[in-house]
Amino acid sequence: LVARALPMLEVELVCQDGSSQKCFAVNEVTVERKNGQNLGFNLVFEHQAYNLQGDGVIIATPLGSWAYAMSACRQTGLPLHSDRQRIVGINLHPDYWDDFPHPCDIDASTEVAVTIRDNNKRPARVLFDSRGEASDLVSLTVRPSQQKVKLLFTPSDDLDLKMRSVIISSR
């Protein structure tokens, strides 16, 4: 067997009460509205800032929640290479689609910052791998972690081809 180490996502959170915490995710980090109103948020990565409004945003690794990430896309995304991340807006308001490259594939080393606007009226929560949760979010920063997750493959398996075949066969 061949072991392959892939980076996890490290997330630094700042909550309304001023507390901060660090969390980790293997698959994805999802920032979403906590109540029935659209979430207003600023998204910054690769020296670009986007002022967005919608249900939220997903930052996914290649191991991430593809079924959910693709169903959240207006268009079908292509399979993601193992050295990339994907940012997907969830039900973004149509006025914002022209400004935001949706979905957006970025280098795995890229840092992504999310700041919630008007978090008293339109609160947000963040999910890690669709399990762990933090509420009353003000901002978060997602970056590749120094911690890795190890996967085992037979020598004839190629991780990128395997992910593509799984994704394509599930369509």
Image (cartoon, grey):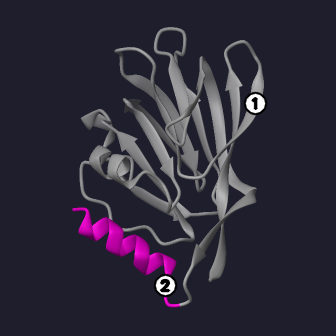
Residue at (40, 14) in percent of width and height: 35
Question: Percent from the top left, x then y, of residue 43?
Answer: 53, 40
Given contact means CB atoms under 8 Å apart, are the residues at marks 1 and 2 in contact? no
Rendered image quadrant of residue 138: top right
Question: Percent from the top left, x then y, of residue 76?
Answer: 25, 58
Question: Percent from the top left, x then y, of residue 23?
Answer: 70, 38
Q: Spatial distance from mark 1 to mark 2, Cα to Cα?
A: 37 Å
Residue at (40, 48) in percent of width and height: 88
The tag on residue 21 is: 1
The tag on residue 1 is: none
* Residue placed most toward the observer, 150 or 11: 150
Rendered position, 98 above or below 20 = below
Mark 2 crowdedness (10 Å alpha carbons): few <14, some 14-19, many ≥20: few
Q: Residue furthest top?
A: 121
Q: Residue furthest bottom?
A: 156
Question: Is 157 inside the magenta-drawn segment?
Answer: yes
> Which quarter of the image is occupied by the C terminus?
bottom left
Question: Is 15 inside the magenta-drawn segment?
Answer: no
* Magenta-drawn stretch, dominant element (helix, strand or loop): helix
Amino acid type of the residue tagged 2 in the rendering: Asp
Mark 1 crowdedness (10 Å alpha carbons): few <14, some 14-19, many ≥20: few
Amino acid type of the residue tagged 1 in the rendering: Gln
Rendered image quadrant of residue 110: bottom right
Q: Secondary structure at mark 2?
A: loop
Question: Percent from the top left, x then y, of residue 111?
Answer: 65, 52
Q: Secondary structure at mark 1?
A: strand
* Residue labelled with disc 2: 157
Magenta range is 156-171
* Residue placed most toward the observer, 126 or 2: 2
Residue at (52, 34) in percent of width and height: 42
